[in-house]
Image (cartoon, rainbow, N blue to C red):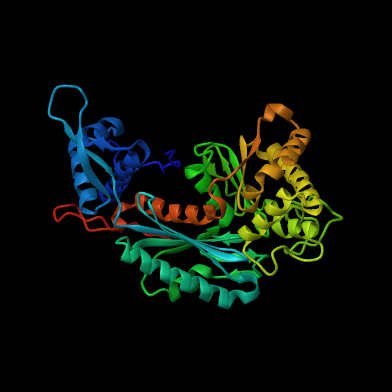
Amino acid sequence: MPGRPHSTVTPESAAPTDQLSLRRANLSRVIGHLREHGPRSRATIAAETGLHKATVSSLVDELLARRLVREAGLEHSGTAGRPGRVLTLDGATVGALGVEINVDYLGVHGTDLANRPLIQRRIPIDAAGAGPERAVARLAEAVRRALADLARAGAPAAGVTVAVPGLIDVERGTVLLAPNLGWRDLPLAERLAAALPARIPVRVDNDANLAALAEYTYGVVAGTADLVYLTGEVGVGGGLIVGGRLLRGADGYSGEVGHLPVDPAGRRCGCGRTGCWETKVGLAELLRLASPTGPPGGQVRDPDQRAREIDRRLAAGDPAALAAVAEVGRWLGLGGAILVNLVNPRVIVLGGYFAILADRLLPAAQAELDRLAVAGPAARCRFVASNLGFTAAARGAAGVVVDRVLADPTTVGTPPVDAPRVPPARTG
């Protein structure tokens, strides 16, 4: 599995200002090495990381005691000497919960530390119509249920990350603006933490950023160092991976590509401006073009079902649906060309409803991108459909919890009696 970029840790030979902090960093170094490179013996870990064998043995003993790694047979290297026991990432007793709240649904994804899925569900709601108070109450209810499910599965959650379509102050866990939800200056992390039965870390981040991390780690183009992820919901958001790292920008608000101004004479956007890109390619616009007399499928709100109804109409040759998808595809390519000219990604990954209708959208979108990208064929950027569907943001959110545990393994489990006592690092 391609790994995310790891934080730099202090080499063992450096003179640390805090030996306990160094141990915490080296615990992270060992478990991160197993995650990225797969099962290894103690001797192999020492050789590949440059840590002393005795140090590795002590670190591994602590990780075993915390039940973050386990022994899995013997390593047969083909050389003389007694074979070493192979260690592998475990974490079956540690859970991670990611939740996405969007206009029409809640997405829930729970895993253990090795990313084995334990919970996955989507709950239709009218988050925009409910207002912030009732929507947060529904969110808290879904989180409490998921936490209980993880506990019953033997993997109590080490944290919760919530994905929200909007501008997020990640450090404070505050939703500054989520126009399609109608939220402004909402202290979501604080409100949610107060509604949960146990003290558990709660973080909030932008949905497209989290989905981009999921695509980079697990998706159809996993490991691609330069990619753009586009959500396809009522609104449109983007997450940018540049050089293998998530691009957040100076204040953490990058990726609001749905609000690129592409048509000064266009329709009014939920953000209050006119002619934003999402007014041309969002699901709401596709439904408007394809069904001028009303939404397809009666009162169905779920975006997955709405998109699949459009797909059925396309298969039946419905002229309005065919014209609508061609129009959205052209605008998708135009906005994609702007992104290619700005950040030169190798791929643009289409998620949400875009992925469901990719076969219909891609020809027009790719043709328009190729026509408008300044570098032309030299840019070598292509659209691809996500294989994570509407789960990408929630999966990315759970992955953030996993990453935080691996960055500081002292936050979970119980160390051996003789291990140095390492206070967990303070988290924001």
Lateral position of residue 413 relative to residue 360, left or right: left
Q: Quadrant of residue 73?
A: top left
In percent of width and height, residue 375 lies at 73, 29
Lateral position of residue 241 relative to residue 296, left or right: left
Q: Residue at x 13, y 25 (%)?
A: 81
Q: 5 or 367: which is nearer to us?
A: 367
In percent of width and height, residue 23 lies at 27, 47
Q: Quadrant of residue 197?
A: bottom left
Q: 65 or 362: which is nearer to us?
A: 362
Q: Residue at x 40, y 64 (%)?
A: 201
Q: Quadrant of the C terminus?
A: bottom left
Instruction: Establish if 173 lies above or below 230.
Output: below
Query: Does residue 10 show up?
Result: no
Instruction: Establish if 317 lies above or below 384.
Output: below
Q: 18 or 421: which is nearer to us?
A: 421
In the image, farthest residue toward the front: 316
Lateral position of residue 107 relative to residue 146, left or right: right
Query: Does residue 182 show up?
Result: yes
Q: 303 or 314: which is nearer to us?
A: 314
In percent of width and height, residue 112 lies at 36, 55
In percent of width and height, residue 308 lies at 65, 55
